[in-house]
Image (cartoon, helix red, strand yellow):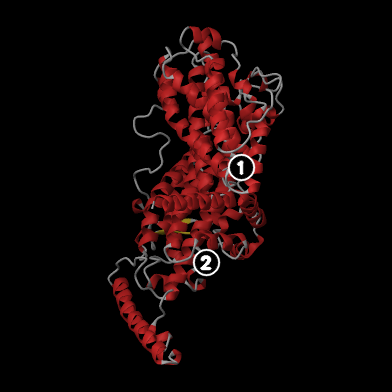
Amino acid sequence: MSSFTTQDSATRISVGDAITPEDLSSSGAAADEKTARYALILGDDSLILAQRLGHWISRAPELEEDIALGNIALDLLGHARFFLTYAGTAWGKTEDDLAYFRDEEEFRSARLVEQENGDFAKTIARQLIFSFYSHELYSRLVDSADETLAAVAEKALKEVAYHQDHAAQWLLRLAGGTEESQRRMQAGLESVWAYVQELFYDAEPTAELAEAGIAVLPSSLRESVMERLTGIIEQAGLRVPEIKGAFGADRSGRFSEQRGFILAEMQVLARQHPGASW
Amino acid sequence: MSAQSPQLHPVEATATTEQISEDARRAAEEARVGWERFEQLIAEDKRVEPRDWMPNNYRKTLVRQVSQHAHSEIIGMQPEGNWITRAPSLKRKAVLMAKVQDEAGHGLYLYSAAETLGTPRDELYEQLYTGKAKYSSIFNYPARTWADIGAIGWLVDGAAITNQVPLCRASYGPYGRAMVRICKEESFHQRQGWEILYTLSHGTQAQKQMAQDAVDRFYGPALQMFGPPDDESPNSKQSMAWNIKRFSNDDLRQRFVDMIVPQAEALGLTLPDPELKWNDERGHYDYGDLDWDEFFSVVKGNGPLNHQRLAHYRAARDEGAWVREAAAAYAAKQQQAAHDAALLTA
């Protein structure tokens, strides 16, 4: 019988010496209330985007993209698990308590990541914006005075660099492919552009934490992120959409219609069996 | 492309002019030498490699088997992918995502292995798209509950491993080597499936019931993954002679039953077969008859989800067509630009 199973595992959740969410929760690192609220913002963005991207698996235009989008989703889910685990230390909660048992108004995700996948071009547009934003964010968060946030940012930064590359390559390819792909890529950008500015909203308590050198002030990312986005869109020969930021850019969830559906699907099983272990 | 066995292709019949006759004579000679070498490789249980001469039927059998396996990985992404957005913990979600992604990767290795036999990937996709190609029938059953993800890992991947470990020694090199890597990942999948069921069967009453229900539904179809009984499996004999297949369907099925009975006991779950009992004389577990009418009905396209699985695959291909066209157009433009630049600097 033993000849029918191999002893080593080819698939691992984390590679080599990389820290894991489990390491984090057993490390004794504890966030204070404000840092935890900041970590929730970072964690929720990654979690919701991972949830959206996970839906692509088995539906992508090419097998290689099933793998690529799955990989990106997996990375983002990993980031979410770190941030939520760390946030939970402030309130004696686990990552799963926070992911599965918070209601809509308690989530802090931006509307950008909540947008529906749409066609492949829309997903790429969303990926382009989010990966450029988070790359800039993590490249500064690595210097955070909070050691845990800095360590997570360091791990995430390497992965997000690849996400950026993936989105930028597809932007160029779709913009420079056929007439239809160019039209769709332009439409994809237009469809999510109203939600870009929310990423730069200085939600409470980021301003205070930024002053203490713990958080990166979102509004301080605007200029460089927009410059880079504008640059790549123009390089692709597309127009930078002239669409103003949508009202209600405060991460409160009060202005999102999608969040409820996302959570209903994500939380359904866990909530059917409260207190159960999985 | 591939030469025929000399016995099947009398050279004289095709020679109409001297030149053709000369070409045919040379081809026949190459085929004769190739055939002898092929027979020798098989006799010595060595690997046949893509550039080696091989009989047409060997090539066809392999393309069929390897591509069916690849298609199974691709369609197999659907029942499990179905639970990615609803996995009940973030860790389970991560493991499941990694698993489904592994399956896409297995599909890729296998399509690549099939391509070394001279059939392009697009042609294989087309065969799946049109419904001409088969894939493992097990994926035409629904993954309705979270426990099904456990049962699929434990029983379906378990049966797959039992089938696939001997394939690591398959005579065709690229296939055997792809299987080595696939088996390593599958064994991880099986363990995580077993662990999902273990957690459920040691959880709340509702969780335990969910686990038992999943095992009840997947047990029979999993046993049927080894194919029809030996006396109804016409292709098996030739595949065994060519060292592609190493054990018969029934032998593998028996091995699998012997493996899962103690595992089910450890889970605290029962297998839905009243005739399942240890046979001291045979040194194996006896098991009851399987519903082969159901099996053939699912193979012929009437399983619970045959239509849905194929429609999902087709929708993904259709909706992605413009992306593939764009990527091809972009690559052609890039190539042209590089070509023009090279001319200018020449």
Q: In the figure, is residue B257 to the left or right of A122?
A: left
* Front residue of this view, candidates B262 and A51: A51
Task: Say above or below: A79 vs B290.
Answer: above
Residue closest to the far left: B44
- Left or right: B209 in relation to B11: right
Tell which subunit mark 2 falls on: B
Residue under the point 44% across and 57% down: B112
User: Horizontal and vertical percent for residue A257?
Assistant: 72, 27
Is A222 placed above or below A10 here? above
Question: How many other residues sit within 10 Å of disc 2, few (<14), some (14-19) or many (≥20)?
Answer: some
SS class, disc 1: helix
Rendered image: mark on residue A120: 1
Mark 1 → mark 2, Cα distance in angstroms = 42 Å
Residue B301 percent across, percent down from the top left: 64, 62
Residue B229: x %, y % from top left: 50, 68
Q: Is residue A44 left or right of residue B15?
A: right
Answer with left or right where residue A53 lies relative to residue A254: left
